[in-house]
Image (cartoon, helix red, strand yellow):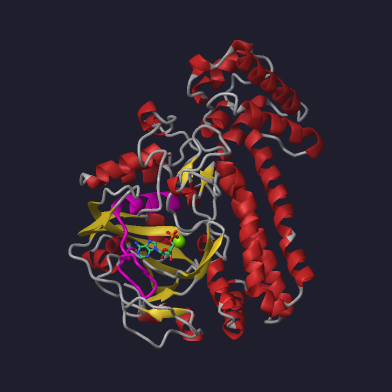
């Protein structure tokens, strides 16, 4: 068990809290958080635990399998030392200032000082209403909890910065949701995920204080964040605050490049969903690119304007950083310095993205003059016909794609990446193979044996990603009482680049039945 002294609840110790302790919806001013207890549930049952996260938190397998664990992470009981609270933040939603939002269904249980992984905050998502719940119920359904649990862990194993997920606990209670806001509400099983991160602070935590003109508290929160999560940046002061903005911009740029590299579409990049640590946070109507299409968004709530489609994510990252810079303006009062800090973003993004593209293509270096046109042409041929992004990069590392093989052999290697090979015209095929030719002459210049390149490519290009339809299959089974497929996916996605015997069915492109099925290609914010 964890000794109470291992909980160092610094956020609530050092920052001002809401003096009101009743759990009712309200505007909370002059405070960064409100104390609030999770709402106990009828029958907490642990459906899945991430063994790596449990270990990171120094939890024993016995504890992770215990009744106490289910009760704590189902919101029914606290461990000694836990002091639950919900954070106050605001945000720009779909481009518009939305005022106070806050942890409407998230409750931080405590800040655990781990033996080897520093400070880790434990946060329940779906554990009942808080002062920030506005008109909603503070609960989460199994469907969205399975998606958050699996994707957090899948992203981590892909090397993408993310909040982690410790546990998935069902509540034994129903939650009513209208999945597509179409006037068809239905009861669904409720669940709670315990998320884990060194900090859950978002851009919106700073924005709300700036919007209210609370410059004193804004400065306190910035300095707290720097001292707690960015101590290497130096002592409090304007220079350090600018260095902090620069670092947040750098991390956000790196995060965007990672999302683009693996084909992840967040779906709701509002500023309240932007982590100050540059982590992926708030897995809602996210999706994975199947066929490569920069205009795709999984979020039907954003289906019309497609603000948060795959291809615009890097620009939106910058837009969101501008909101953060605006928020801290009163602390710096120097536009050129803020702009200079933000200029790190495009530079870092370009550099990181090129580096990642080179790795995906098996190139040792990226020479912009030569390789940019090659990549531009690649993304063009990937849009000629429905091409699975994940499989394409794996197919490109097939031994048959080499300078000594015939056009037919090369084509056969690429074929698994195409959704409708029968619709590939002779012209399309010729253009794709012409690109492969230019690619092979480029890799030949590196003078490396093809097998070595192929091995390196297969170390960075995943074979297994949390395809939208796979998550939905796991949900269907879990709703029918069988968590087996969640565990199978969790196990497989632990080694996303490594071919695993007996797991070929988890590496297949989206089957045709999933093309238009709700939850597979279309999701909404209802969760
Ligand atoms: P999201 O778009 O999911 O990041 O949510 C935006 C805001 O709505 C956040 O402040 C959430 O805490 C809040 N929210 C979302 N779903 C619920 C819910 N079921 N109950 C209470 N608050 C919610
Ligand atoms: Mg959110």
**Residue 139 belongs to magenta span:** yes
In the shown orientation, is residue 328 left or right of residue 295?
right
Where is residue 9 shown, x and y percent of the image?
44, 80
Q: Nearer the viewer, residue 56 or 295?
A: 295
Q: Residue 344: which quarter of the image?
A: bottom right
Q: Is residue 194 left or right of residue 453?
A: left
Which residues are the magenta region? 126-153
Question: Image height check: is 117 above or below 253?
Answer: below
Question: Which quadrant of the structure image shows residue 451?
Answer: top right
Viewer-proximal residue among 57 and 155: 155
The image position of residue 359, as x and y in percent, is 65, 39
Residue 516 lies, with reference to residue 206, above or below; the image says above
User: In this rendering, would 442 be left or right of 525?
Assistant: right
Horizontal and vertical percent for residue 105? Answer: 36, 66
Q: Quadrant of residue 293?
A: top right
Q: How many marks?
A: 0
Q: Nearer the viewer, residue 298 or 184?
A: 184
Q: Is residue 166 magenta?
A: no
Q: Residue at x 61, y 55 (%)?
A: 317
The percent position of residue 142, horizontal first and vertical second, equals 29, 53
Image quarter hosting the C terminus: bottom left
Identify the image quadrant of the N terminus. Answer: bottom left
Q: Residue furthest bottom?
A: 19
Examine the rendered structure and indicate whether residue 288 appears above or below residue 41.
above
- Residue found 37% across the figure and 55% down from its top: 50
Q: Residue at x 56, y 43 (%)?
A: 310
| Residue 8 appears in the figure | no
Say if residue 269 shows up in the picture.
Answer: yes
Q: Give the quadrant of ligand 2.
A: bottom left
Residue farthest toward the right in the current orientation of the protein: 369
């Amino acid at each position: 068990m964890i000794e109470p002294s291992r909980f160092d609840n610094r956020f609530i110790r050092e920052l001002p809290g809401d003096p009101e302790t009743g759990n009712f919806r309200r505007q909370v001013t002059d405070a960064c958080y409100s104390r609030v207890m999770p709402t106990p549930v009828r029958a907490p049952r642990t459906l899945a635990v991430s063994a790596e996260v449990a270990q990171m938190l120094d939890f024993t397998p016995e504890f992770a399998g215990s009744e106490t664990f289910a009760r704590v992470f189902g919101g029914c009981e606290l461990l000694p030392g836990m002091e639950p609270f919900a954070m106050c933040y605001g945000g720009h939603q779909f481009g518009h200032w939305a005022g106070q939002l806050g942890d409407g269904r998230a409750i931080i249980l405590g800040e655990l000082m781990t033996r080897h992984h520093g400070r880790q905050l434990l946060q329940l998502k779906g554990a009942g209403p808080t002062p920030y719940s506005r008109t909603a119920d503070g609960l989460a359904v199994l469907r969205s909890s399975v998606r958050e649990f699996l994707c957090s862990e899948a992203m981590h194993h892909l090397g993408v910065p993310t909040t982690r997920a410790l546990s998935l606990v069902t509540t034994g209670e129903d939650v009513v949701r209208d999945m597509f806001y179409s006037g068809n509400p239905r009861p669904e099983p409720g669940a709670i995920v315990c998320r884990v991160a060194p900090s859950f602070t978002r851009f919106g935590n700073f924005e709300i204080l700036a919007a209210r003109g609370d410059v004193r508290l804004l400065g306190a929160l910035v300095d707290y964040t720097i001292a707690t999560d960015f101590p290497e940046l130096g002592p409090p002061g304007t220079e350090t605050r600018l260095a902090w903005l620069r670092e947040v911009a750098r991390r956000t740029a790196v995060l965007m490049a990672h999302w683009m590299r693996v084909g992840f579409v967040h779906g709701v990049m509002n500023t309240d969903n932007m982590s100050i640590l540059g982590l992926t946070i708030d897995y809602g109507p996210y999706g994975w690119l199947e066929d490569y299409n920069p205009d795709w968004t999984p979020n039907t709530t954003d289906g019309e304007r497609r603000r948060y489609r795959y291809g615009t994510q890097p620009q939106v990252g910058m837009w969101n950083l501008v909101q953060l810079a605006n928020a801290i303006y009163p602390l710096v009062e120097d536009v050129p310095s803020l702009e200079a800090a933000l200029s790190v973003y495009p530079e870092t993004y370009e550099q990181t993205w090129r580096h990642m593209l080179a790795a995906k293509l098996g190139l040792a270096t990226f020479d912009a003059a030569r390789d940019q046109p090659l990549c531009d042409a690649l993304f063009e041929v990937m849009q000629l016909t429905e091409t699975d992004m994940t499989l394409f990069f794996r197919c490109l590392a097939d031994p048959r794609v080499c300078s000594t093989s015939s056009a037919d052999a090369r084509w056969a290697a690429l074929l698994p990446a195409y959704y409708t090979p029968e619709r590939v015209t002779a012209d399309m095929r010729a253009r794709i193979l012409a690109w492969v030719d230019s690619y092979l002459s480029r890799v030949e210049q590196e003078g490396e044996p093809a097998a070595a390149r192929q091995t390196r490519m297969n170390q960075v290009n995943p074979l297994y990603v949390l395809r939208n339809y796979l998550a939905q299959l796991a949900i269907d089974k879990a709703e029918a009482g069988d968590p087996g497929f969640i565990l199978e996916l969790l196990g497989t996605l632990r080694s996303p680049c490594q071919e695993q015997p007996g797991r070929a069915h988890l590496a297949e492109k989206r089957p045709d039945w999933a093309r238009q099925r709700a939850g597979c290609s279309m999701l909404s914010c209802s969760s």
